[in-house]
Amino acid sequence: MNPQAELLNRAISEANPVVFELLSEKGRNIYFPAKGLVRQGLDASTKRINASIGMAMEDDGSPLRLKAIDSKLNMPPEEAFPYASSYGKAELRDIWKNIIREKNPSLGDHPITRPVVTHALTHGLSMAGYLFVDEGDEIIMPDLFWGNYRLLFENAYGGILSFFPLFEGSGFNTAGLESKLNSPGEKKILLLNFPNNPTGYTPTEEEVGEIVAIVNRAAESGKKIVMITDDAYFGLVYEPGVFRESIFAPLAALHKNVLAVKVDGATKEDYAWGFRVGFITFSNKLMNEGMAKALEDKAAGAVRGNVSNCAHLSQSLLHAAYKSPDYREDKERKFALLKKRYERVREILASRYASSDLFDIVPNNSGYFMCLKLKGIDAEDVRQRLLNHYDTGVMAIGDLIRVAYSSLPTDLIEQLFENINNACKDVKN
Ligand SMILES: Cc1ncc(COP(=O)(O)O)c(C=O)c1O
């Protein structure tokens, strides 16, 4: 093992050996190569003559650049063209850390790591896989999940997705979670995504209290738990009584046997899907500065070995947005638009399709999506029928039709459900 990895492992173990035990083999071996080319580049960066790094400079010392690109940018070239750090742009990491605290008041002043920038959430989840998933490890999650988890955790790291039914009646299936978490084996990896894709469900405040108690009981009984939260749709909660913080917050300082890993980012929250900026952040009850820095170094090392570093231009644009005085108000306006669509969906479903013999409405209260569970009708056939006869596109996932009302002008929502209803009838007959 590289001595730099050993140093990081020691810092983690000294604070809490459980967190070290939770690392995968790759996670134990990874380190940020602070002494190699990166260090030499940093050493040279303040020198008058810097012939160290693999970029090119104009004779005036600014980044060498093409007019066709530069003319489109309304920002200093230094904020767009050079490489960003593998950890991410420092100012962005700090502002995002403050944003996490602001949006999750129950974190209180418990330490969390400085978020490390990832190439959006997919890559953040992949880095969580790199650090914690070994071949054959189970990743526990609800049975309704984002399909890309298979490629992310199974194909890339040899993990095995292991499901419990998301719902018990119309609420979160706490008993299913508890029995999965207490299945044989000491190390447990749990992945929760709220608001959930595909259902648009977020647990109520009461349900979150139960989930936290379940994780605590499992930890007390000796389970060692990596708790990954995929917060892709964070903040898009439309109903009172539904948990508004990330479930990372109540788990961050819960128990020494729980390592909380928050994966989040601008993609859906800030409507910047193509920017590819996400973050990975850690917390544990016994986290001290040494452990925090070591986890950041390991995450940044994994990023460096994977994509080297993430797009500087996107990071600068987001940093500018988060500092902008208009950001919050603008974001509230966009939230209001999505909420209006959510309410329109509820209204139409409640008034026309509450007791349909074609489909049930899957519980939903947040996010971008809602689902209809078809009653003995093939969802793919319905999808095809919608495409071919109704000029309408939806997703078919198992026996569910997923509707992304987030992407639909409000005045088309009524027509959409009429089309789905008719297509279901057509396929049934
Ligand atoms: C639940 C969930 N997590 C993560 C992602 C990936 O987000 P990103 O585009 O930031 O990689 C998605 C995208 O659809 C998602 O639905």
Image (cartoon, rainbow, N blue to C red):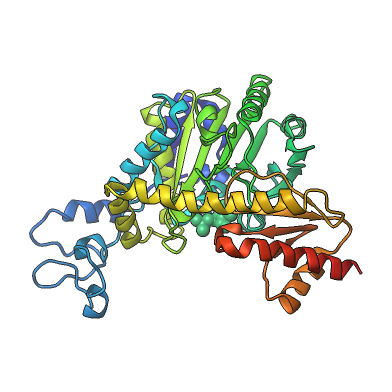
Q: Quadrant of residue 182?
A: top right
Pinpoint residue 290: horizontal percent, then vertical percent: 37, 30
Q: Residue furthest front?
A: 351
Indicate whether 126 appears above or below 247: below
The answer to whether residue 370 is left or right of residue 293 is right
The answer to whether residue 175 is left or right of residue 233 is right
Q: Residue furthest right?
A: 429
Q: Nearer the viewer, residue 30 or 58?
A: 58
Q: Quadrant of the C terminus?
A: bottom right
At a point 23% along the width and 56% down the height, the residue shown is 41
Pinpoint residue 343: horizontal percent, then vertical percent: 60, 49
At a point 31% along the width and 41% down the height, the residue shown is 94
Pinpoint residue 44: horizontal percent, then vertical percent: 17, 55
At a point 63% along the width and 43% down the height, the residue shown is 365
At a point 22% along the width and 66% down the height, the residue shown is 74
Indicate whether 287 appears above or below 357: above
Indicate whether 408 appears above or below 259: below
Q: Nearer the viewer, residue 224 or 108?
A: 108
Pinpoint residue 345: horizontal percent, then vertical percent: 64, 53
The mark total stands at 0
The answer to whether residue 191 is left or right of residue 285 is right
